[in-house]
Image (tube, grey):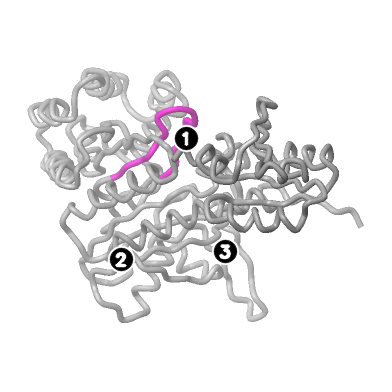
Amino acid sequence: MEIKKLKGIREYGFEEQLLREKILEVLKDKFKKYGYLPIETSILDFYDIAIKKYGGEEIIKEIYRLRDRGNRELCLRYELTFKLAKFLALNQVSFPFKRYEIGKVFRDGPVKKGRLREFTQCDVDVVGIKDLWVDAELMALTFDIFKELGLDIIVKVNNRKFLFGLMEDLGIDNAIEVILSLDKLDKYGEDYVKKELETKIEKEKIERLFYFFDKTKNFSNEKKLEFFKKNLKSKEALEGLKEIEEFFYFCVAFGLKKDIYFIPNLARGLAYYDGMIWEVYLKKGLKSSVAAGGRWNSMISKFLNRQSYATGMSFGLDTIFEVLKEKKKEKNIVLIIPIETLEESIKIAQTLRKFFNVDICNKPLRKALDYANKKQIPFCLIIGKKELEKGKIRLKFMESGKEELLDVDEVIKKLTGK
């Protein structure tokens, strides 16, 4: 039998999974610090429930469908948000309800870099709070998480009410179709989007739309808000602008005074967002978002059969993993190579494990160094009898090849910088 690899899935070995678990530890720790607690929902669900309250046609096409022995039409979960809505509809809970969930989701879509068919979502959501301070709190959580991960970010924000109100002011009836095209701006560029819009709306409306975007491109957040308030009349647009102002007010209250930007053309592809929306990007490197979210009041209200409020976001574990994998290995990973000193090396390893992750490779020196190179371990401690007689061990910097003869305390100071 031929052993094949299924397209669109990933499996992870020791080193990769350790990094993923480290990311998850940071996420879980920060989630809990902000009052989110874990739940777990099922991977299988009824297909009709999965699509009934959801308007995202593109994702519906990507749902994995199957039938069980009772001929019931089922599906694999394609996201965690509708699962939360269903969970709240079926269970008596206290509100506001703050939860996080981390789990696999499945989408039968095109496979490309950064997009798999089986991937892990890390979601946090709050249900039952109308005020936008909780959206701003999610921003504080986001900056805390990425600071802990050593990644510098910016956040792009917008409001769906503002977007639909802008469409109304411009006399655009097929607002959803136009907004879906605008969602492609960052990915495909202005020329591509304008050409696509020519099949949907009149040329003068396209020009007017991009006049607003181009005019405000280099404005500050405050100046953009002032400009649109002066130039738009739609009640929905003005309500959306008011929400953006409130959001920024609370961001300042959380100590967030930079790196959050009002982007008027930001659309977000998911159809159930109906208020504030945002996407998180790295300042350098990767062009795709590493986290995103927004308000989904309408969807949760449909599931609960009453007016309710919900906001939340998802962190891209797989994307963050790929970014961190490319960064240099951390300085607190060392390999001990005993040269006929295994017992003494074990004792030293136990001491060093209070400060570093330590591995021992009891092989001949050349093979042990090859092992370190394959594992991309930046530091090796070569412990031989001659070194121990002097109370020293040999620290080898794998990248430069440089070596230093140090005692254990000096090694700790050298590698911790303390």
Judged from the image, the secondary structure of the residue bearing numbered disc 2 is strand
Q: Are marks 1 and 3 in contact (CB under 8 Å)?
A: no
Image height of 71 relative to 355, above or below: below
Identify the amino acid type marked 1. Ser
* Depicted 387 relative to depicted 303: above or below: above
Identify which amino acid the numbered label 3 is placed on. Answer: Leu
Q: Residue 212, located in which quarter of the rendered image?
A: top left
The answer to whether residue 11 shows anywhere in this view is no
- Binning the other alpha carbons within 10 Å of mark 1 as few (below 14), some (14 to 19) or many (20 upward) gives some
Residue 124 visible in the snapshot: yes
User: Which region is colored magenta?
Assistant: 277-291
Q: Earlier in the sequence, mark 1 or mark 2?
A: 2
Dot 1 and dot 2 residues touching (CB under 8 Å)? no
Of 156 and 44, nearer the camera is: 156
At x 29% / y 72%, what residue is drawn?
304
Residue that appears at 65% across and 34% down: 405
Q: How many angstroms separate mark 1 from mark 2 (CA)? A: 27 Å
CA separation, marks 3 and 2? 24 Å
Residue at the extreme front: 389
Q: Position of residue 330 (x, y in %)?
A: 55, 40
The residue wearing badge 3 is: 76
Helix, strand or loop at mark 1: loop
Crowd tier of the residue under label 2, counting other residues whose Cα lies within 10 Å: few below 14, some 14–19, many 20 or above? many
Question: Which percent across, then down, holds residue 23?
Answer: 50, 51
**Chain-order first, disc 3 or disc 2:** 3
- Residue at far left of view: 230
Q: How many marks overall?
A: 3
In the picture, the quarter occupied by the N terminus is: bottom right
Task: Name the residue carrying label 1.
Answer: 288
- Name the mark nearer the viewer: 3 or 2: 2
Q: Which mark is residue 98?
A: 2
Relative to the observer, which residue lies in front, 225 or 321? Answer: 321
